[in-house]
Image (cartoon, helix red, strand yellow):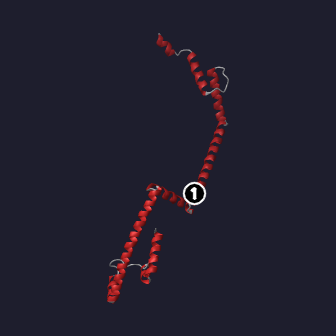
Amino acid sequence: SFGRVTFLSRKLAADQGPAFRGLLRTDPVPEEGEDVAATISATETLSEEEQQELRRELAKVEEEIQTLSQVLAAKEKHLAEIKRKLGINSLQELKQNIAKGWQDVTATSAYKKTSETLSQAGQKASAAFSSVGSVITKKLEDVKNSPTFKSFEEKVENLKSKVGGTKPAGGDFGEVLNSTANASATSEPLPEQTQGGL
């Protein structure tokens, strides 16, 4: 719609001549009270005829602004009607705007560089975790193969065979506990237990 307004203002400039084109220039407009002395001196130097011409031009420009406002309002109403007929509501427009905005963001070089950097960081972190896991596994194997662990393992096996009798080596921990419980249940009663019964 901005392009349409620009087109209309250019068409009006062509129709109205140099006076209207001068209004379309982007010269800074003095703020209220900013250049009062220059404004007063400018009206003093204008002839009555020039002032009348400027007043007519002012009225014409105000009328054109009013017309453009009405045209813009009519176009906005027409746009809303077309969207309503197409079933486009505010939520859908918001979704489309967000999707387009995200697409614009992902197309930027900054996003691409950041994404690439994060991807590389993820790969490096994954490799680091993998190497840490390998180091831990190797250390555990080293501990298992160490003479201290072997000695401890042999002592556990000896204890197991003493407690459980002549069972084959390599039973699980549950079997060791069961055999220990069975061995203590079948052993002689403690002196305290015999004294309590007398």
Residue 69 visible in the shown view: yes
| Residue drawn at the location 64% of the way across and 31% of the way down | 153
Q: Is residue 75 above or below residue 163?
A: below
Q: Is residue 180 above or below residue 5?
A: above
Give the quadrant of residue 160. Answer: top right
| Residue drawn at the location 35% of the way across and 80% of the way down | 58
Disc 1 designates what residue? 115
- The 10 Å Cα crowd at callout 1, few under 14, some 14 to 19, many 20 or more, is few
Expressed as whole percent of the image width and height from the top left, the position of residue 161 reads 64, 23
Q: Is residue 6 above or below residue 178?
A: below
Residue found at the very far top of the displayed protein: 198
Q: In the drawing, does residue 113 fall left or right of residue 55?
A: right
Near-viewer residue (141 or 18): 18
Q: Mark 1: which secondary structure?
A: helix
Expressed as whole percent of the image width and height from the top left, the position of residue 47 reads 33, 90
Expressed as whole percent of the image width and height from the top left, the position of residue 31 reads 36, 77
